[in-house]
C-alpha cells in the first residue's frame, strides 16, 4: 500500500465512545489525515471504520487488532503499524478498562446530600468497588490494559514516533479519578487494593511526564488529558437505565457546579465515576473530546508536560479546555518509569523468539 499522505493518527480503543468520537472530529478537521483504529474487537472496529468512511468517504481509515492487556498482541499490532506507516504523528492512548465494577448505592445517596457532593462526583471517591483479574501474562488486568500495554506499544513504535526534524505526540486519556493516594510504587499493579482504575490513571499521569523527560531531544512528547465526567460503554451496565433517568436532573445541576462534568462522549474522553450508558444523556456529543482535539492543534513545545489538560463544559454546554498541575513528583515518576522498563525487558526476554518472529528477525 502506498505511503500515507498527510499526518497519521493511531487511536487505541477507537471503535466506540470517546475513541470513535475523537476519530470523527479529527477527520472533520483534517480530511487528509490517515487514521488507524487499534481495537481489540475487529468486528466493532470494522463497523466503526465503515461509519467513518460513510461520513468521510475520501479519508483513509484502517484497523489493526490490538489488545493492550496481551503483550504478544501489542507486539503484533506494533509491527503492523510500523510496516504500514513511515511515521505516526499522534498516538492516542485511549483504550481502557475499569475491571468488574460495583457501585455502593448508599454512598451515592449520601453523596447527593453531602456538602462535598461536587468533589465526590467529580472524582468518584468511594462510590465504586473494582474487582481486578489476572491476564494470561500474569499481570493485573487494569494495569496491563490501561498502562503497561500502552507503554510497550510506545517502546515498540519508537522507529515511527522518533523521527529526525519531526515531533510526534503521545496523548493519554486520563481521569479526574487519578489520585496519588490510590497509587503505591511498591505495588504499582495495584494487586492488593480496591482502586485499580484510580491507581492506573495516576500511573499514566506520572508516566506521561517521565516519557517526555526520557525522550527529550528525540522528537517525542507526551501529554495527559482528562475528558471530565463522561457516559461511555466503559461503564455500561453498572447501574440500570432507570437510575440515570432519575439522576439526569442532578447531572445538569452538578454541571453548573462542576465544569468538568461534561457528560457526553464528545464532552470528555472517559467515564470517571459510575455512570451507565443512557442515550438521552449525550447532551452535546461534541464537547467530550474537546481536549483531545485541542492538543493535536497545539505546538507541542508550548505545552507543559507537568499539567493535565482537561475538557470543561459551561452550564449550557459550551466546551473549553482548562489545565491543572499534575499532583506528581518527578523522582517518583522516574522510578516508576524504570520499573516499567524492567518489566518490559522481562517480557522481551520471555517472548524473545515470538517477538523476533513477529518482527521478521
Image (spheres, rainbow, N blue to C red):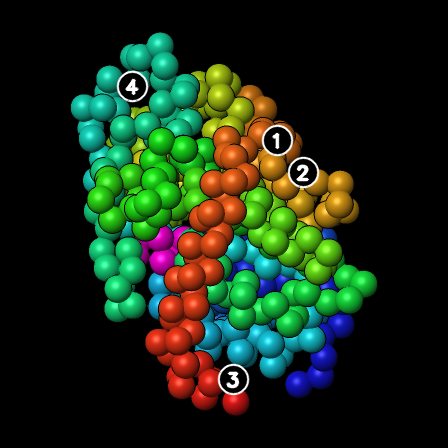
Q: Earlier in the sequence, mark 3 or mark 1?
A: 1
State the residue position of label 3.
359
Q: Are marks 4 and 1 in contact (CB under 8 Å)?
A: no
Q: Compare marks 2 and 3 and give the one earlier in the sequence.
A: 2
| Circle 4 Cα neighbour tier, 10 Å, few/some/many (<14 / 14–19 / ≥20) | many
Q: Quadrant of residue 139?
A: bottom left
Q: CA distance from mark 4 to mark 2?
A: 34 Å
Looking at the image, which is closer to me, 54 or 30?
Answer: 30
* Residues marked 1 and 2 touching at CB (< 8 Å): yes
Check if mark 4's residue and mark 3's residue have beta carbons within 8 Å: no
Q: Which residues are magenta?
A: 141-146
Which residue appears farthest toward the right when viewing the image? 165
Q: Quadrant of the N terminus?
A: bottom right
In the image: residue 157, left or right of residue 184: right
Q: Residue at x 53, y 78 (%)?
A: 79
* Magenta stretch holds residue 218: no
Label whose residue precedes the other's in the sequence (4 or 2) = 4
Taking depth in this image into account, of 217 and 242 the one nearest to the observer is 217
Q: Is residue 144 magenta?
A: yes
CA separation in Å, label 4 and label 3 = 52 Å
Amino acid at each position: 500500500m502506498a505511503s500515507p499522505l498527510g499526518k497519521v493518527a493511531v487511536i487505541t480503543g477507537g471503535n466506540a465512545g470517546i475513541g470513535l468520537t475523537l476519530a470523527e472530529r479529527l477527520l472533520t478537521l483534517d480530511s487528509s489525515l490517515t487514521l488507524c483504529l487499534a481495537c481489540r474487537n475487529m468486528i466493532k472496529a470494522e463497523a466503526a471504520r465503515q461509519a467513518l468512511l460513510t461520513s468521510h468517504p475520501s479519508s483513509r481509515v484502517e484497523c489493526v487488532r490490538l489488545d493492550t492487556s496481551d503483550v504478544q498482541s501489542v507486539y503484533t499490532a506494533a509491527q503492523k503499524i510500523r510496516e504500514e506507516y513511515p511515521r505516526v504523528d499522534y498516538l492516542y492512548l485511549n483504550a481502557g478498562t475499569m475491571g468488574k465494577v460495583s457501585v455502593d448505592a448508599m454512598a451515592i445517596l449520601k453523596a447527593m446530600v453531602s456538602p462535598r457532593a461536587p468533589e465526590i462526583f467529580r472524582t468518584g471517591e468511594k462510590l465504586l468497588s473494582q474487582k481486578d483479574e489476572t491476564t494470561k501474562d500474569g499481570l493485573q488486568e487494569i494495569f496491563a490494559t490501561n498502562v503497561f500495554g500502552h507503554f510497550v506499544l510506545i517502546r515498540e513504535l519508537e522507529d515511527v514516533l522518533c523521527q529526525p526534524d519531526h515531533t510526534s505526540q503521545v496523548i493519554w486519556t486520563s481521569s479526574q479519578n487519578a489520585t496519588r493516594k490510590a497509587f503505591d510504587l511498591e505495588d504499582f499493579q495495584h494487586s492488593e487494593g480496591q482502586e485499580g482504575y484510580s491507581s492506573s490513571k495516576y500511573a499514566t499521569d506520572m508516566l506521561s511526564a517521565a516519557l517526555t523527560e526520557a525522550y527529550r531531544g528525540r522528537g517525542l512528547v507526551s501529554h495527559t488529558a482528562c475528558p471530565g465526567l463522561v457516559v461511555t460503554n466503559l461503564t455500561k451496565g453498572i447501574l440500570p437505565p432507570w437510575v440515570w433517568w432519575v439522576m439526569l436532573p442532578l447531572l445538569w445541576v452538578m454541571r453548573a457546579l462542576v465544569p468538568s462534568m461534561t457528560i457526553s462522549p464528545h464532552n470528555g474522553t472517559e467515564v470517571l465515576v459510575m455512570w451507565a450508558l443512557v442515550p438521552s444523556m449525550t447532551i452535546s456529543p461534541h464537547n467530550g473530546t474537546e481536549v483531545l482535539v485541542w492538543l493535536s492543534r497545539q505546538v507541542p513545545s508550548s505545552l507543559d508536560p507537568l499539567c493535565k489538560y482537561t475538557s470543561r463544559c459551561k452550564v449550557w454546554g459550551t466546551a473549553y479546555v482548562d489545565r491543572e498541575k499534575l499532583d506528581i513528583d518527578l523522582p517518583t515518576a522516574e522510578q516508576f518509569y524504570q520499573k516499567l522498563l524492567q518489566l518490559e525487558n522481562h517480557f522481551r526476554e520471555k517472548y524473545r523468539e515470538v517477538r523476533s518472529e513477529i518482527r521478521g528477525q
